[in-house]
Image: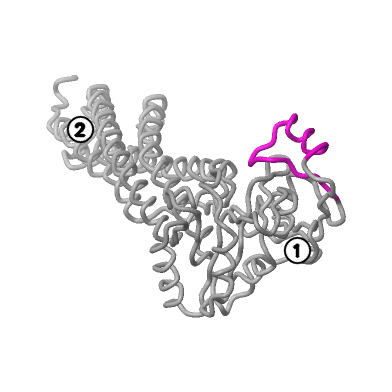
Amino acid sequence: MTLWIVLRNLRVRALATLLTLLGVALATATALVVPLVLRSLERGAADAAQVFDLLISAKGSPTQAVLSSLYLLQPPIANLPYATYADLERDPRARLVIPLGFGDNYQGFPLLGTNTQVFELRLKPTLPPYFRLRQGRPFRSTYEAVLGARAAQATGLKVGDQFLSAHGFFATQQEAAEAREHHQEEKYRVVGLLEPTGGPWDRALLVPIQAYWEVHEEGAAQRQVTAVLFTGKRLSDVYQVAQEVNRGTQAQAVFPGQVFAQTKDVLLQGQSAYGALSLLVLFLAALLIWQGVYAQGLERRRRTALLRALGAGRGVVFGVVLLETLLEVAIGVLLGILLGWGLAALGSGLLGERLGFFLPPPLLEVGLIGRVLLLLPLGVLAALPPAIQAARESPLEYV
């Protein structure tokens, strides 16, 4: 009976109910969107870098080294002498030593000079290779290319197609035209297409490092590499090599996981600030609920008096007002959670497209849900004064 009265009251004042639901839903979604997107970014960035054990680059910012060489988001710091790569390649502790050479692009997608050991990278020794061919084969000769999944899809290149590269990370139409005339004499031929990994290298066009040297007219004495990926036979080998490299003056050894952890700390600081803002938004939503409940309490005084005249006890009247508010807030929070998750999923997708790697769908964690569920007790507290007032209302006042 009480629930039927509550649903009838909500239907009678449909516009006021809709506005309250909208306010609660928007406040809930606002409190959820940014934390959900940031956590998707954290997971996506961690997944994209975990295949790489140790990155060796020129001295400078470790963050820029990771963003340029692993995430392909910034220009490299500088190049390393070929001797640095050669010494690492001869090191008996090395299992994989993969050179990286940057500086060219095709239609804005970076060319990555490397060697065939890149196709041996694994997330774990027991897992299959991280970079797996969907079609074709790995490159063998100098001007052959293997395309990441996104690069192949965006450029339309297929196995057997040929292309000319342009200088720089990003190509304008003029640069592309100049590249066709001056950049190289021999075209690259596509020999393989990779399965999508969800990582930033899906945007890369992998070519032999020898092509990088030839295109840039680097003879044996002038050869350079942008960075080197190192995987040791044992974990202790990786740490030993990192210490030795960092004691030198030309190169730095960077653990991608450590750089990501530092970047995550910065993100968490911003998330904490947003968390305080979201609590303020929830408090404003609680004020909205209180104002709505109080205004509705004044409007329903005649209906409440009628209920009392028909024999409804004070407990029933008190319960109707309280349940009405609780139901409004609960529905508004539920709608807000759905709206917040939807907006976060859309935002994660757009951000992933812009950054060039896959961001997993947002996860509704217990802590985030608990934050917005604070609106339920706040709504109940807001409803207590008008509920008590309604329960004390005398039906004789409206006779």
Q: Nearer the viewer, residue 376 or 122?
A: 122
Relative horizontal placement of residue 76, taking residue 134 as reference (left or right): left
Provide residue 37's location: percent of width, then percent of height: 45, 45
The magenta-colored residue range is 162-182
Q: What residue is shown at x 62% (from left), y 67% (from top)?
A: 130
The quarter of the rendered structure image containing the C terminus is top left
Other residues around mark 1 within 10 Å, as few (<14) / some (14–19) / many (≥20): few
- Place residue 336 in its image quadrant: top left
Which quadrant of the rendered structure holds the N terminus? top left
Q: Is residue 217 above or below residue 30?
A: below
Most foreground residue, 172 or 304: 172
Q: Residue at x 82, y 46 (%)?
A: 163
Identify the secondary structure beneath mark 1. Answer: strand
Residue ID for mark 1: 134
Alpha-carbon neighbours of circle 2 within 10 Å: few (<14), some, or many (≥20)?
A: many
The spot of residue 324 in percent (x, y) is 30, 38
User: Which kind of residue does numbered mark 1 sit on?
Assistant: Arg
Residue 167 in magenta stretch = yes
In the drawing, does residue 377 fall left or right of residue 86?
left
The image quarter in which residue 386 lies: top left
Residue 203 visible from this viewpoint: yes
